[in-house]
Image (cartoon, rainbow, N blue to C red):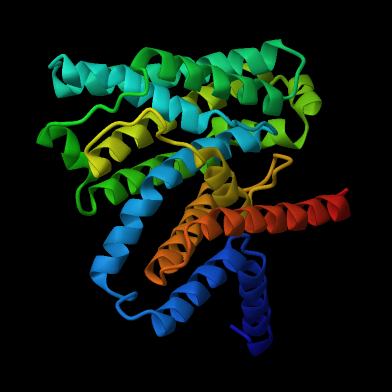
């Protein structure tokens, strides 16, 4: 192979790395780890990363579902409410002594039903998904409070807490990541999601059943929200009616910071994973530095605005 050809191949490889969409957020994650490791004693330890991994898994799993929805050009503000509804209503089976497998099936089934309802409403009513899911968020939370009367479910059996111990939540998160990375990158389903986000009418004219795919995306979001709820119960050891409050904003932050366009049509599950890690590292670092927890919401909001502003700039230039 000639030197000129080798040089050309090296340039092409370098160009691939430079165009790697997730590269910026990966570099941010590395920078945050380095900064906090120098500022906080004990940050760069196995125990610290175990705690961080347990923190990011619930938001991370919800964020994967949010990614599927945003790729289609939609949004789901009800993910936290679905999580709460599923574990509070399905969790009544724990009090009644139902088998663990049946309780989990009920919780996941409730997530699927509520996600399916979101998708049906979004595709059948000529109102933006933002408004629809804002409405269903309040409906789901209202029903949860009426049924539970605001009472916690405590005394969760040890068998239900196994999914929240050690690195088990991270294993669940990685399995979810692997499945959805494959489906978004290597299947017709994934390609059609991107096509719908890039232009719903064009996808429709190309023969893509747009409404069906949108319903599937919202249903998957509901399912993953319920799965995250199961892990949350395992981690906390109790069920509270206000579970999942703020999850929608944290999930959106992880998705847009990870490089998925808020306008739909471009992004990746891998980027969402890195965005979840980035958010988890910042929250963990602030907690370990004993920063007032109210600042966490402030910082999350700043990050969302910054990420969306960059995305809007990219979208404007592209257009």
Is 48 on the left-hand or right-hand side of 241?
left
Residue 251 lies, with reference to residue 190, above or below; the image says below
Q: Residue at x 29, y 59 (%)?
A: 51
Q: Residue at x 72, y 52 (%)?
A: 308
Using the rendered view, name the quadrant where residue 300 is placed. bottom right
Q: Residue at x 31, y 52 (%)?
A: 54
What is the x, y in percent for residue 91? 27, 22
Asked if residue 227 shows in the view, the reply is: yes
Q: Is 166 in front, or is 140?
A: 140
What is the x, y in percent for residue 162? 16, 41
Is 286 on the left-hand or right-hand side of 188?
left
Asked if residue 209 shows in the view, the reply is: no
What is the x, y in percent for residue 194? 66, 37
Using the rendered view, name the quadrant where residue 39 is placed. bottom left
Residue 198 lies, with reference to residue 309, above or below; the image says above
| Farthest bottom residue in view | 3
């Amino acid at each position: 192979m000639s030197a000129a050809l080798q040089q050309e191949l090296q340039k092409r490889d370098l160009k691939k790395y430079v165009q790697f969409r997730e590269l910026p957020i990966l570099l941010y994650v590395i920078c945050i780890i380095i900064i906090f490791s120098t500022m906080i004693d004990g940050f760069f330890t196995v125990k610290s990363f175990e705690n961080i991994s347990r923190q990011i898994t619930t938001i991370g799993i919800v964020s994967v579902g949010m990614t599927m929805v945003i790729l289609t050009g939609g949004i789901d503000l009800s993910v936290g409410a679905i999580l709460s509804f599923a574990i509070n209503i399905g969790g009544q089976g724990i009090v009644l002594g139902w088998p663990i497998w049946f309780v989990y099936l009920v919780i996941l089934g409730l997530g699927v039903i509520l996600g399916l309802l979101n998708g049906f409403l979004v595709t059948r009513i000529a109102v933006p998904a933002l408004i629809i899911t804002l409405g269903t968020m309040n409906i789901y939370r209202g029903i949860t409070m009426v049924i539970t009367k605001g009472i916690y479910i405590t005394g969760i059996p040890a068998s239900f807490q196994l999914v929240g111990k050690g690195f088990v939540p991270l294993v669940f998160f990685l399995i979810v990541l692997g499945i959805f990375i494959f489906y978004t990158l290597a299947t017709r389903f994934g390609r059609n999601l991107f096509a719908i986000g890039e232009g719903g009418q064009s996808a429709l004219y190309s023969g893509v059943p747009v409404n069906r795919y949108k319903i599937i995306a919202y249903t998957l979001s509901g399912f993953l929200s319920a799965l995250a709820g199961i892990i949350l119960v395992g981690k906390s050891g109790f069920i509270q009616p206000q579970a999942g409050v703020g999850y929608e904003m944290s999930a959106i932050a992880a998705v847009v910071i990870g490089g998925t366009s808020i306008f739909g049509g471009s992004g990746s599950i891998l980027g969402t994973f890195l965005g979840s890690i980035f958010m988890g590292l910042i929250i963990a670092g602030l907690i370990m530095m004993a920063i007032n927890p109210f600042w966490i919401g402030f910082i999350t909001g700043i990050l969302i605005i910054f990420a969306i502003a960059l995305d809007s700039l990219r979208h404007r230039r592209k257009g």
